[in-house]
Amino acid sequence: SSGINAEYGVTSIGVWSILIKGTVLLSVFTNLYIFCFTSEQLMTYAPSLFTVTPLAVEEAAKAGSDHVHDIAAGAGMTVAGIMAVLEHGLLVAVAAVWILLPDTPGEVADELARREYVKFLREHDKTRVVGVSSTT
């Protein structure tokens, strides 16, 4: 089956749904990695977990910054733990959205059900279809 229905158009987005969900999950990991290890955002919230090393003028010109921040000695597990807690929290939130929000809005599901019912009535007993135009 091609996934195309002549009356209603495409019946699903097929493999794109899997790709979109995969992209969402991958973005959770990449954004948290950036937050915890490569940006200064976590350092702003927990400065005691990081050390700041000033750069020489030549290095600063190449790096685009006058300093480098590194994870402080003994704080690596704490930073990794923060990342793990945030990651699990975001994954639970993503799972909750996928589970709790319907794939098809209620109004759309109702209209599709109505169309199927009208189609069924037309095919089986044309005298029962009342108030429905022949173009619906």
Image (cartoon, rainbow, N blue to C red):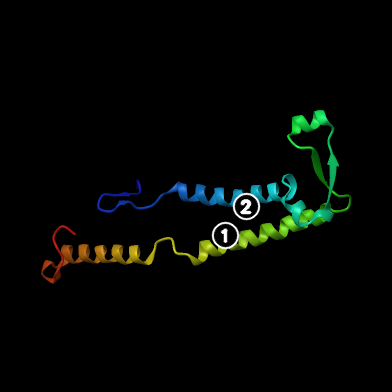
Query: Which structural element holds mark 1?
Result: helix
In front of the other: 5 or 106: 106
Total numbered labels placed on residues in the image: 2
Q: Residue furthest left?
A: 127
Q: Is residue 15 left or right of residue 122?
A: right
Query: Which structural element holds mark 2?
Result: helix
Is disc 1 surrounded by few (<14), some (14 to 19) or many (20+) residues within 10 Å? some
Q: Residue at x 51, y 49 (%)?
A: 20
Disc 1 to disc 2: CB gap under 8 Å: yes
Q: Quadrant of residue 47?
A: bottom right
Residue behind mark 2: 28
Quadrant of the snapshot with the C terminus: bottom left
Q: Amino acid at mark 1?
A: Val
Residue 73 is labelled as none
Q: Is residue 131 left or right of residue 97?
A: left
Q: Amino acid at mark 2?
A: Val
Q: Residue at x 25, y 53 (%)?
A: 7
Whole-percent x and y of residue 59? 80, 31
Q: Residue furthest top?
A: 58
Whole-percent x and y of residue 22? 55, 49
Whole-percent x and y of residue 48? 84, 55
Residue behind mark 1: 94
Whole-percent x and y of residue 63? 75, 33
In front of the other: 92 or 75: 75
Q: Using the numbered discs, state the Cα–Cα distance from disc 1 to disc 2 in whole angstroms.
A: 9 Å
Q: Is residue 131 left or right of residue 84?
A: left
Is disc 2 surrounded by few (<14), some (14 to 19) or many (20+) residues within 10 Å? some
Q: Residue at x 75, y 53 (%)?
A: 44
